[in-house]
Image (spheres, rainbow, N blue to C red):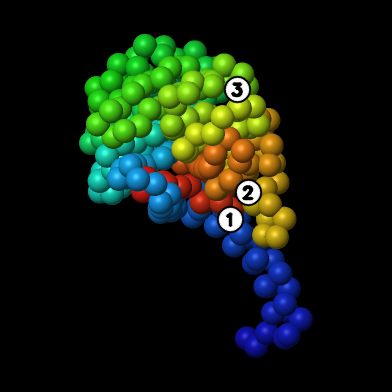
Amino acid sequence: MKLSRRSFIKIGALSIPSLILADGFLVEAEAYKINHISMGQAFGIKCVHISDIHFKGDKAYLNRIVEEINSLGPELVFFTGDLIEDSKFLSVSLELLGNLRAPVYGVPGNHDFTSKAPFSEISKAFEKTGGAWLVDDLVKLPEFGINIFGATCHKAFHLDDPEATILLSHYPVIVNGLSRKHKLILSGHSHGGQVRIPFWGPLYLPPYVDKYDMGFFNTDAGPLYVNPGLGYFHLPVRFFCRPEITVFSL
């Protein structure tokens, strides 16, 4: 049957929203990308930054992420919060992350707190990788010539340790309160909005993000990178905002 021009336009108009929904729910939600960033610094370190896993039991997806990170061969892995939303998923998520072949240094996000997951278990799991679970703590890595501070709060009045060169914070807005520069600040929390409208930006952002919705920002506190995360909150959808594994050359 031959379609008239008007029928063809109607079918196309109905198909576009369906394609957008299919892309957001079925494709982009787990179609992570790998973003390589060279900082041009003199540490000679390759590290990976991940954030906002929000593990809900999808072992295949998290295992794929772990295998991808291992294939990249980083010397350090940084995690900036929201491993889970429900503590019943904690043990499985930690078991899978335990397969990472690099030390993992991480900080809690708001959902890690509200899940009431025992941080002692997370700390033990991160220590087994050679890393640490940093709850307002500083760790020194003389073999790499860096120090890492893990902040739990969105306020920065207590984070001015002169020895911290890399700051991990779940909340990007922390940069607005820092009084000294860091070599690198890594955050998450925003999910990049999950759904972004071209030429407009994110439809919604959570509190404590400010203008730092996704990607790289030069701030008075130093270079900030906001990872859009690997998981999702509420709906399993992403649009123009793919999950991301970020690889830094420092």
Q: Earlier in the sequence, mark 2 or mark 3?
A: 3
Give the SS element for disc 2: loop
Q: Which residue is mark 1?
A: 240
Q: Earlier in the sequence, mark 1 or mark 2?
A: 2
Q: Residues within 10 Å of mark 1 (few under 14, many from 20)?
A: some
The vertical placement of 245 against 121, above or below, is: below
Type of the residue with mark 2: Val
At 49% across and 55% down in the image, what residue appears?
27
| Residue 195 image label | 2
In this rendered view, identify the residue nearer to me: 55 or 217: 217
Q: Are the residues flagged by discs 1 and 2 in contact, CB closer than 8 Å?
A: yes
Give the SS element for disc 1: loop
Type of the residue with mark 1: Phe
Type of the residue with mark 3: Ala
Q: Quadrant for residue 17, please give it.
A: bottom right
The vertical placement of 150 against 190, above or below, is: above
Mark 1 and mark 3: Cα distance apart in space: 31 Å
| Residue 37 image label | none
Q: Position of residue 159 (x, y in %)?
A: 54, 20
At 61% across and 59% down in the image, what residue appears?
20
At 58% across and 35% down in the image, what residue appears?
221
> Can see residue 104?
yes
Give the SS element for disc 3: loop
The vertical placement of 85 against 202, above or below, is: above
User: Looking at the image, which residue sits at the far right?
Assistant: 6
| Residue 156 image label | 3
Instruction: Please indicate whether residue 124 sits to the left or right of residue 16 in the image.
Output: left
